[in-house]
Amino acid sequence: MKKSSLWIRTVIIIAVTLFGIYLVIGPRPLTSVSGKDFTWEGIKGNLANNINLGLDLKGGSHLLMRVKTDDYLKTLTEGNKEAALNAAKDAKDANGAPLYAKDNRGETTFPGSAVFVAENGRYEITLTVNDAAQLQPVIDAIKNKINFEGNGWTQSVNNNTVTWSLPVQAQNALKGQAVDQALQIIESRINYVGVKEPTLQKVGAANSGQILLQMPGVDDPERIKKLIGAESRLSLMKVSSAPNPSPAQTYPTLEAAQQAAAGAPNKKVFPFNEREDTNTPQQTAPVTKYVVVETPAIIEGDQLRDASAVSRTGTDRDYQISFSFKPAGAQIFGDWTGKNINNYMAVVLNDEVKSIAYIKSQIFDSGEISGNFVKTTAEDLALTLRSGALPAAIEYQEERTVGPSLGADSIRAGVQASAGGLIFVILFMLIYYRGSGVNAVIALLLNMLLTIAAVVVLGSTMTLPGIAGLILGIGMAVDSNVLIFERIREELRLGLDVRKAVNLGFDRAFITIIDTHITTILSSAILWMFGSGAIKGFAVTLILGLLINLFSAVFVSRTIFMWLLNRKTKMEKLSI
């Protein structure tokens, strides 16, 4: 081989090696390099920063949770029943005249009944009208506002009754959507906390609704659990009250409020913790009253564009939540406020009235929740509002906390196992293959270095199974060298000179090396696609080690032999 080609190969190896060393123990960014980085403490610090350790090595929290998808379908069914009941009030006869007149309170009542069933896998909505002749106009009015069929519901009509049912296939699809939505919301909330390299994924059977969360470095998961499961159901609702300047109508007891709302299916009662003296929010205990609001809500929290915690007095104990709407939500809110000047509106958060205000003028874009929040609570609530409401409640099925000392023990055991295996392999190669064993050792050490560097580049998390994959990669790397060296020995036994024996040894062993590596990589890829977090860590390091081994055991090792064979004096014997 020409000397220039050999130098090109050498430069490539040196450049890759130096880059790998920097990736593993170098500071980030490169411009921040200092003398401290070359000390033992600096190297250890950079190594800890560059390699993301998993839960089993760093310690942290393991949470297995389940989305209550049955509750989600129940809430969906109930909501669709309320929406259908309200849509039915728009029914018109053949001449376009309203079928149902308003009562003495100015409210349209539905002449019939509406029920829903949500139990034992059955999800049904049934509307019954008093006059069968009015059923089709009612169905038409509902179809104008609710696309039952498009969302998987099936419709059946019997005399004066219409029933919408949710088949099993549609149930499973909606449950899957609920889990996917919960996964996205949990991810956004976890990212806010700043947990480094969390593992978040669906696990279990397709319909189990299970989600696994592993958080390395988090040894107190209580705040995380509260943040994950925090509700953020925000609604702006009209208060059933005389308009301003009359005070907003509140009731001292739940019974009194329920009595005021009796007979009106479009009204609900919510508690309202009002302070007697709003000028001294931290010194006055709240007084619980009750408010009657009208449904459906003016606008729901899914129309929020942003939410943030804002201090009212500059202290950490008097915060409020400011929010703004998406364009479509702003238009809806603007239309309503323009038609309801002086009427009262309630900000309802998680079935509790947080504040009541009357509409002074038309408002389009923004609003606020004044609940005398402390800073942390306000910031967490603003986060949950921004990320959206969970489609259903979360229940925790398993919780484990791994202490940092146990993680340190795992690291120590993994390092000792890796070092022990490496030392044993090095001794074997040096004793059995003599001088050529040095070649194999260099390739082996480079393989380990570049595998760890690849883990750093990909941002993968190093776990205990990942260390096992690294050790297995060492074995595969040694196997490649053994195949090459044994082929070279065979060629030497046939009487070939050293140069030709080395070239034929590499060429003929290469196909076998490719075959073994491809089959192992395919198996590891299947583990990566279908395995859990720990299995993925094993598969990733093994795949990376095998791919890099094609460079270290073949390209690097052959280059070293080339330097030996290109000396001026012809090599008569090879130490192998």
Image (cartoon, rainbow, N blue to C red):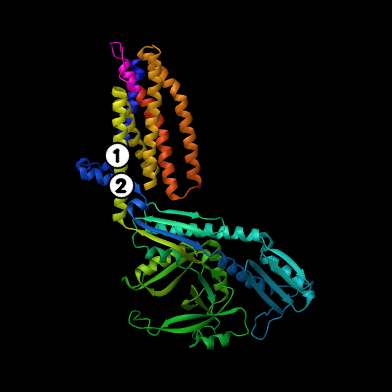
On screen, residue 428 versus residue 460, left or right, reads left
Quarter of the image for the C terminus: give it.
Answer: top left
Residue nearest the observer in this picture, 440 or 362? 440
Residue assigned mark 2:
413
Label 2: few (<14), some (14–19) or many (≥20) C-alpha neighbours in 10 Å? few
* Residue stretch rendered in magenta on the structure: 559-576
In the rendering, at what x and y percent does residue 304 appear? 50, 64
Residue nearest the observer in this picture, 256 or 145? 256
Quarter of the image where one finds residue 472:
top left
Query: In the rendered view, would you say 270 is above or below 83?
Result: below
Q: Is residue 575 magenta?
A: yes
On screen, residue 158 versus residue 149, left or right, reads right
The overriding secondary structure of the stretch rendered in magenta is loop
Please, what is the three-letter code of the amino acid marked with disc 1?
A: Gly
Quarter of the image for the N terminus: give it.
Answer: top left
Residue nearest the observer in this picture, 188 or 158? 158
Question: Residue at horizontal 50%, vertical 69%?
Answer: 233
Residue assigned mark 1:
420
- Disc 1 or 2, which lies upstream in sequence? 2
- Distance from disc 1 to disc 2, alpha carbons, whole Å, reads 10 Å
